[in-house]
Image (tube, rainbow, N blue to C red):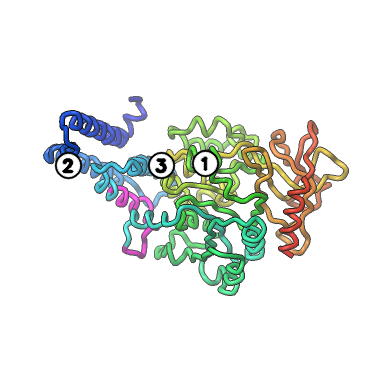
Amino acid sequence: MNFYALRRPWIILIIACLTLLCLVSFNLIRSRNLHSSPADINLPLSVQESDRLLTRELLHILEDDVRQHYDQNTLDLIEIKPYAQKFTALWNLHLQKNDLLDGSLRQTISNIGNILYPWLTAGSSNSSMDFLESTFTRERGIVITSGRQQFRLCMHLVYSLRTILNTDLPIEIMYGGDDDLTVQERNLLASAGDDIRFVDVKKILIDPDNLIELPGSFAIKTFSMLISSFRQVLLIDADGVFLQDPKVLFENKQYKDTGTLFFHDRIFSRKPDETIALVKNWLKNTKYYNDILKDSLFFEQKTGHEMESGVVLIDKLRTMSGLLLTCHMNLKRQREQVIKPIFYGDKETFWLGYGISDTRFQFAEGYAGGIGRYRLNSTTHICSLQLLHVDESGDPLWINNSLLDFKVANDDVYARFEAWDYGAEPSSWTSDDDCRHPNEFRYGTPTRNITPVNTEIKGLLDKMIHLAK
């Protein structure tokens, strides 16, 4: 065992629990060999009781360590880091469904959850474990967050999903109170098709101490994923545009391997050395630290934006600890005093929450491409506000930033989708005076031509624009 492990005694305790499980499994196998009747396979009661007592004592020590040493008032992610990692280790043990550990382990997870994430059950009589288990009632579906400002774009998305792409995935639309999304607006969205539900996040997360303060702009997205009824939850921003049935994402190899699928943002700008050093310090000595740094242009300071959260896919059962820490990073004080000074919105909190908590995650290949109109007479560059992501075969899958030419204007001018590219050279997103809008970028590389939008995709986008009008 290395020096770092010795400085974290809880690791030794977790290893002790695992060792105990191995010993019990060995005894079960030996018992099976010594007895001819299946009814005699169980260990003698005295042995089982002894093992249970030892297990409970180990779990009690783990819980007591968190209770005594975790400071709920600190904003420093270094403070919660070792305890979030404990929660991850315990949650992963829980997924193994061992009878010896199950009851005591469930209680320990619940108690530690109450300490680390008190906002989960504040204002209710539920334990944190009861609450978390209530979020797995349906297998998979789509979550969309929509307030009044996103209502028009949400209408575009929901109607295109139901009437053009004909996806049968259930949809839950999350909002933060009647002022955020009115009854009339909800009724209009519901008319798009079957199995569209609405969830007022503020009625689920009571928040009597105002730790969350929803809707909280971008922050509502992480909490919406948590409280949705889906075990496998696909978050889509209201300004998302899918070119295929989003159901294909659940078959993605990276998602099946890890229970996560994140998407890289566009390659643009860079963060100062101080920010890179801070983030590395948060991630230092975490389980997947080297993997995170290995393929990251963010840490190479070639881009200031690692992840975009226009689409996020997670299996909550497999990766709950990472999602909880992500939500923690979006609490009112954390997002205002820790995240906002160095990042824009919620997007970087996903991979950081997963990485800091030792929860495995994976990005789709490549950084965001673009889809838009040809720049002047160029065959190598486009002007675009729309980011493009592709499927595992390299075909266009989804677009971020709506069908509108310039969504901030909220007018009836729609984008011209003439050509696309993905995987161009780093620093391929650049400001350009020849592109019309303040936030519009030139995308492409001089070394290759961009790809014209084919007839099938053009027809699909034309249908969506016609429906939106």
Seen in the picture, residue 416 relative to 445 is either above or below; the reply is: below
The region drawn magenta spans: 108-125
**How crowded is the residue under tag 2: few (<14 C-alpha within 10 Å), some, or many (20+)?**
some
Q: Label 1 crowding class (10 Å Cα cut-off): few <14, some 14-19, many 20+?
A: many
Q: What residue type is labelled 1?
A: Tyr
Q: Are marks 3 and 2 in contact (CB under 8 Å)?
A: no
Residue that carries the numbered disc 3 in the rendered image: 81
Select label 3 or label 2 by which is in front.
Answer: 2
Marks 3 and 1 in Cβ contact (< 8 Å) = no
Residue 448 shown left or right of residue 214 in the figure? right
**Which residue bears the numbered disc 2?**
53
Q: Considering the numbered disc 3 on the image, is that residue within a helix, a strand or a loop? A: helix
Q: Where is residue 37 in the image (x, y as percent from the top left)?
A: 17, 36
Name the side, left or right, on which 175 lies relative to 58. right
367 displayed left or right of 44: right
Which quarter shows the N terminus?
top left
Instruction: Provide residue 394's location: percent of width, then percent of height.
Output: 67, 38
Find the residue positioned furthest to the left: 46
Residue at the (68%, 53%) spot, across then down: 401
Q: Name the residue under label 1.
A: 255
Quadrant location of residue 267? top right
Quadrant for the C terminus in the image: bottom right
| Nearer to us: label 1 or label 2 | 1
- Observer-nearest of 79 and 112: 112
